[in-house]
Amino acid sequence: MGKSNLLPGYGWVFAMGDGTCNVGLGTVSPSAKSQKINYRDMFYRWLANTPPEWGFSPENQIGKLGSAALPMAFNRQPAYARGLLLVGDSGGMVSPFNGEGIPYAMESAEMAADAVSRAFFEGPGTRSAEKALAGYPARLKDEWGGYFRLGQIFVTLISHPEVMSVCTK
């Protein structure tokens, strides 16, 4: 009782505009690596449960199956160093709640552009310009730090089989 083989994660389908789709799944479980999970098998089992009319079958697959870790909750730091500002995925700006990253990429790019613009206005290489650029990570954390921290706590909670079982009932 209370056991669950459910793994916290999500799936996605992105239309590519040419009649094809980018289809994938991801896990947010910090213990998934230690469980030696066969992600390829998990992916194909997940696809087998999609509606047949979607056509997501191995026969229709065009590209190779690939994988990569999603950088979440500011797990790529520092966001600013020696003239380099990280935005979006490069700065770990993916939501731990749902794997969403596009809005964070767009908003962080806007914040980075603001910082660069202020630095340029202050005069490249000046102390004031450095202060403008160094303010970028603080702005990110002010904007999303609490949300990403809460997401990390959420992921930790749902990684416990007992909690996941209760959440999915």
Image: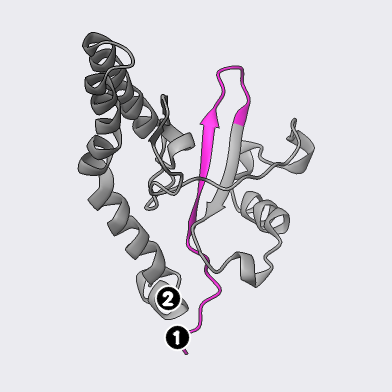
What element does badge 2 sit on? Answer: helix
Estimate the spatial distance between the alpha carbons at disc 2 and disc 1, rounded to whole Å: 6 Å
Residue 165 numbered mark, or none? 2
Q: Viewed as shown, does residue 12 lie left or right of 123?
A: right
Q: Looking at numbered disc 2 in the image, what kind of residue is underneath it?
A: Ser
Residue 156 visible, this angle: yes
Residue 2 numbered mark, or none? 1
Q: Is residue 18 magenta?
A: yes
Q: Looking at numbered disc 1 in the image, what kind of residue is underneath it?
A: Gly
The residue at the point 42 percent across, 28 percent down is: 82
Residue 150: x %, y % from top left: 28, 58
Instruction: State which region is magenta.
Output: 1-21
**77 or 101: nearer the viewer:** 77
The residue at the point 55 percent across, 51 percent down is: 26
The residue at the point 51 percent across, 42 percent down is: 12
CB-based contact (under 8 Å), mark 2 and mark 1:
yes
Residue 142: x %, y % from top left: 20, 42
Answer few, some or many: residues within 10 Å of disc 2's Cα (few below 14, many 20 plus, some between 14 and 19): some
Coloring basis for residues: one colour
What element does badge 1 sit on? Answer: loop
Q: Vertically, is 34 above or below 66?
A: below
